[in-house]
Image: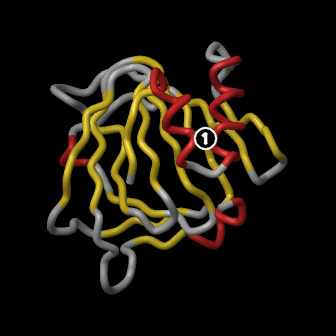
Amino acid sequence: MQTGTLANWDIDKTRLPQAFDLGVAWLLAHLDAPCGRHEIDGGRVYVSISEPGTKDPCEGRLESHLRYADLQVLLEGAERQDYCTHYPEGSAEEDRLAEQDVAFWPPQPAVQSVVLAPMDYTLYYPRELHAPNLAVDRPGPTRKAVVKVSAELF
């Protein structure tokens, strides 16, 4: 897991595979793009824009992916994300990896949190557990982009 702000992207991107910069460059040029999936490099890099709003943290679920990394950029609002640096033992509560590249996990020990302001980002590599879209104080509206980068590119 990595976190930062796009104000420092020129420095941060030097430590990441070039595919992440491809997605962020597109995003910065299209901040007003409509909600939905926007293909950048076929299915290997795309940006998903949504307005999910935040929910009470007790409703959050830890998730993980196998085929894609998530670079989540908050565009509007405030959001808390929980994450766990230890990959869990056992099985996911709900496994949709084959169809949707997502698995949901039961609560884990040693969960940490990060709070995002507009233009902050988090980066989760495959298998890293994270629970996005959590309220900071109380549920509210958000707009965010998720740059999805295929694991085959790093």
Residue under the point 46% across and 21% down: 7
The scheme the figure's colours follow is secondary structure
Q: Quadrant of the C terminus?
A: bottom right
Q: Seen from this angle, which residue lies furthest bottom? A: 90
When the figure is inspected, residue 62 is found, relative to residue 98, above or below; the finding is above
Depth check, front residue: 82 or 142: 82
Q: Which percent across, then down, holds residue 33?
A: 68, 19
Image position, residue 143 (x, y; %): 48, 23
Instruction: Say how many tags the image has.
Output: 1
Direction right: furthest residue: 42
Looking at the image, residue 151 sits to the left or right of residue 76; the answer is right
Q: Amino acid at mark 1?
A: Val
Q: Nearer the viewer, residue 2 or 35?
A: 2
Q: Is 115 left or right of 129, judged from the image as shown?
A: left
Q: Which residue is mark 1?
A: 147
Q: Residues within 10 Å of mark 1 (few under 14, many from 20)?
A: many
Q: Which corner quadrant holds the N terminus?
A: bottom left
Q: Quadrant of residue 64?
A: bottom left
Horizontal and vertical percent position of residue 123: 46, 47
Residue at x-position 68% and y-position 58%? 150
Q: Residue at x 21, y 68 (%)?
A: 108
Secondary structure found at label 1:
strand
- Residue 87 appears left or right of 111: right
Residue 72 horizontal side relative to residue 98, left or right:
left
